[in-house]
């Protein structure tokens, strides 16, 4: 494990020192997030390009410590495609179709490198394995693209996305170490270190944002790592574990889809119903909201670790309790109800 501590430390240090450079470059190039609508919590222009620091630190660390086999190279190439798509979108907004096309290409590169869900185990009593065959590639691409975008959806408050990504990567790193998935430990350490090295500059009040460049890259890396380590073969247990590990972004995305369908709104239409918006509307400050969601992410991670090493009955009780809490909290905070934009704005101010 000492090697992976060194990987983590290297990624952390590189990200910590690259971020101020990215901030200065963003000011020089005019790559700034200028608040234009009420969905923006900040009031002053904030430089983007934090994602470039995260990307650079991750890639350099992988180049230093990876064996550069087919899988490692595909992850870096796919991550570079995602990075470029996010960078172009941060500099000049691109159409959702073009952004999606880039994400699919990046996902296909990862699948080519081995990040593929090959078969489903034990879905029906009496059948041990169902090989996905021709469906393996599209299902794997769907998972990668979906998770890539979930991190972007929670990137709405200072330090939220980078902190949640770091917690998720750290949880997977811990689980990989006790489950014997040594081949993904390096990638987990890279993402955890890169995210945490960026966090001091991104925590409220943020000096720099990661933008789509960073959010999409982190989401992509977490998606690929999850397949390589836990979803190579799909079991109910593996799905539950990954849902818990990526709890905040996955459930926020789920509630957003349900809310928009219920309110007869386009699924891709932005609103103020995300979990961080609802907590702000309840009177919590930005820092309080982010810290609350950090704690929730840690609890999700702890539940995933407990579930992975528990007896079936104990695991079922944990999942039942978590499900009840999620549904109750979602209804209580109005995650699936109609969003009153003006009322929320007044409460936050």
Image (cartoon, helix red, strand yellow):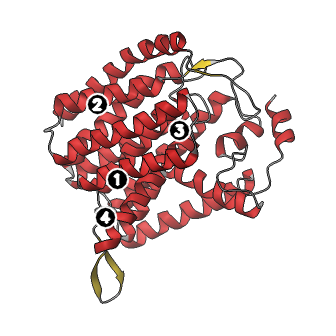
Q: Residue furthest bottom?
A: 126
Q: Sequence-wise, which precedes: disc 1 or disc 4? A: 4
Q: In the rendering, at what x and y percent does residue 332 appear?
A: 74, 54
Residue 67: assigned label: none
Residue for badge 3: 294
Q: Sequence-wise, which precedes: disc 2 or disc 3? A: 2
Front residue (pair 331, 324): 331
Residue for badge 2: 59
Residues at marks 3 and 4 touching, judged by CB atoms closer than 8 Å: no
Q: Sequence-wise, which precedes: disc 3 or disc 1? A: 1
Residue for badge 4: 117
Asked whether residue 327 is in view, the answer is: yes
Q: Sequence-wise, which precedes: disc 2 or disc 4? A: 2
How much space separates mark 3 and mark 4, taking CA atoms?
29 Å
Residue for badge 1: 226
Q: In the rendering, at what x and y percent does residue 277 appear?
A: 70, 40
Relative to 214, 233 lies left or right: left
């Amino acid at each position: 494990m000492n090697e992976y501590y060194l990987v983590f430390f290297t990624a952390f240090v590189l990200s910590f020192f690259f971020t101020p450079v990215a901030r200065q470059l963003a000011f020089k190039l005019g790559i700034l997030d200028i608040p234009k609508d009420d969905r923006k919590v900040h009031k002053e222009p904030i430089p983007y390009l934090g994602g470039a620091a995260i990307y650079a630190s991750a890639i350099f660390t992988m180049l230093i410590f990876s064996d550069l086999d087919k899988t490692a190279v595909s992850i870096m190439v796919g991550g570079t495609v995602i990075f470029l798509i996010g960078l172009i979108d941060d500099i000049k907004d691109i159409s959702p179709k073009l952004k999606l096309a880039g994400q699919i290409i990046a996902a296909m590169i990862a699948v080519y490198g081995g990040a593929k869900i090959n078969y489903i185990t034990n879905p029906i009593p009496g059948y041990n394995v169902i090989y996905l065959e021709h469906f393996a590639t599209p299902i794997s691409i769907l998972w990668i693209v979906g998770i890539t975008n979930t991190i972007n959806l929670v990137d709405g408050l200072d330090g939220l996305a980078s902190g949640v990504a770091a917690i998720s990567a750290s949880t997977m790193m811990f689980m990989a170490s006790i489950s014997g998935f040594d081949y993904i430990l390096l990638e987990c350490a890279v993402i955890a270190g890169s995210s945490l090295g960026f966090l001091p500059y991104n925590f409220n009040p943020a000096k720099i944002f990661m933008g789509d460049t960073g959010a999409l890259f982190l989401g992509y890396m977490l998606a690929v790592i999850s397949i390589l380590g836990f979803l190579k073969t799909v079991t109910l247990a593996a799905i539950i574990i990954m849902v818990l590990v990526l709890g905040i972004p996955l459930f926020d995305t789920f509630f957003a889809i349900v809310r928009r369908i219920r309110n007869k709104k386009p699924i891709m239409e932005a609103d103020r119903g995300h979990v961080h918006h609802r907590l702000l509307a309840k009177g919590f400050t930005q820092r309080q909201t982010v810290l609350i969601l950090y704690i929730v992410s840690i609890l999700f991670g702890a539940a995933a670790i407990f579930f992975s090493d528990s007896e079936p009955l104990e695991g079922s009780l944990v999942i039942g309790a978590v499900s009840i809490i999620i549904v109750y909290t979602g209804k209580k905070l109005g995650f699936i109800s109609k969003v009153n934009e003006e009322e929320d704005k007044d409460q936050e101010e």
